Image (cartoon, rainbow, N blue to C red):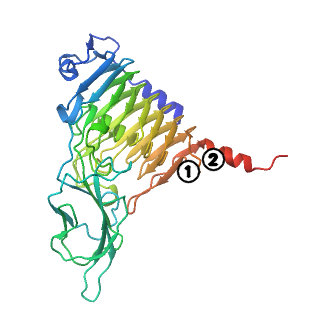
Amino acid sequence: MNAPSLLAALLLVPLATIRAAEHVIQPGESPQEIFDRAAAGDRLVFLPGLHQHGLGKHRAMLYVDKSIDIELREGAVFKLLPGVCKLEAEGEITTDQDSAKRLDDLEIGGTFDTSQPGVDGPESYGAKIYTIIIDGIGSDGKPDTFAWGDGKLFETPHKKVRVTGGWQTLNHGVKVRFSNRTGHSKGSLWFISYDGPVAYGIRIGHGRQAEYIENVRIFGKGTISMNGSENAQPSGLVKDINSCVLVHGRVRGVAVEGITMTDTNRSVMCYGEHTGEFLAGGAVGSGESFDAENIVVQRTRTINPNGAAYLFGHPSHRGRLRNVACNSNYMETGKTALEPNFNLDGYEVIGNVMKSDGQAIHCWRYSKNGVIADNLRVCDNTGKPVVVVNAPRGWRAPEPPVMRNNRNHLSDAREAEKRPTR
């Protein structure tokens, strides 16, 4: 299916044509209570003003499980209350960035001192992240060695630490243990994150709902803010991270249009779920798949200088994702702006404008049947590409998308200046 046909098909997803009622939400009123009273096919309208709320069902300010229109009027700001999410002492190991390990036997222990500040910079979201890499392979009875650091990602000033097989102290109360003293592959990589708990703005589906949630539209000229400036956020490397809008599991026929999203890990995320055993490189064992499909994100704005924007598919949530259109959006991000990440079948990324300190568009792990066209990277004079297509070690690479007319406007102009004139 070509790009115009895909978008046309998604926009033809049937929506309820008869609205039973319109429910107006004033600042200070509970949107979840009003939503729960509404019938399928109704409309919720956030009136102008500050709508500040904590977290409710499934860690969301508003959890959606039926067909609904949600309008954020111009001047309406749907925002997480300050101080809802605090830095936690329990860490989480990330192994998905490297599935080519011979042994994946790292454990964490101790009690992290939450008074320690996080690493400055957009990759950390205020979290403390440890990088651990096997930097030596033992021989003649000697153990393997590892390097570690708790500063910027991949920086490991502590090197050639011998693996003892017991608990080994790093710092700030953190301990690690490898079950095996030898047998690792050199370069094996782990991250350990000490960060804040996950939070969502509007969440559609909790991942394993048995029936499809259909025909949800989130639109308007208002704003959703996860208030990451006043809340501890997940590190960005863990399984569950913050987003203004999350589509999760058996959900189809969703449109996100016009709104602005800010101060979050990601603006919009969408992925399925799977009950099978997760295998190296993205495969799964036998089990049930909870898939999302027919998703449109268009004409939105992401203003997120410390985070990222759109994420479609996720290596730690391995259901399938079909027919996604992310078109004509504007984004300013500190990290990757737009990421078709994993397990997509049929997607288009067309006509977006991206100002990003990281990647602009990163196809990152296996997906197929994609079209990436007419996207513009702005405010970058370093010559970074608009589109990157690759995969971490041990993962299947993406099927190359159809690409045309993706431009870095400053670099393109500079190259044009170098060409001889006649």
The numbered mark, 1 or 2, whose residue comes first in the sequence reads: 1
Looking at the rendered structure, the secondary structure element under dot 2 is helix
Which residue was labeled with disc 1?
Answer: 384
- Please state if 398 lies on the left or on the right of 55 as rendered: right
Q: Position of residue 329 (x, y in %)?
A: 48, 32
Q: Is residue 132 visible?
A: no
- Residues marked 1 and 2 touching at CB (< 8 Å): yes
Report the number of discs.
Answer: 2
- Give neighbour class at mark 2: few <14, some 14-19, many 20+ (Cα, 10 Å): some
Q: Quadrant of residue 109?
A: bottom left
Residue at the image position 19 percent from the left and 52 percent from the top: 114
Q: Position of residue 100 (x, y in %)?
A: 34, 66
Determine whether 53 is above or below 154 in the image. Answer: above
Residue at the image position 34 percent from the left and 16 percent from the top: 48
Determine whether 247 is above or below 398 in the image. Answer: above
Which residue was labeled with disc 2?
Answer: 411
Q: Quadrant of residue 226?
A: top left
What amino acid is at disc 2?
Answer: Ser
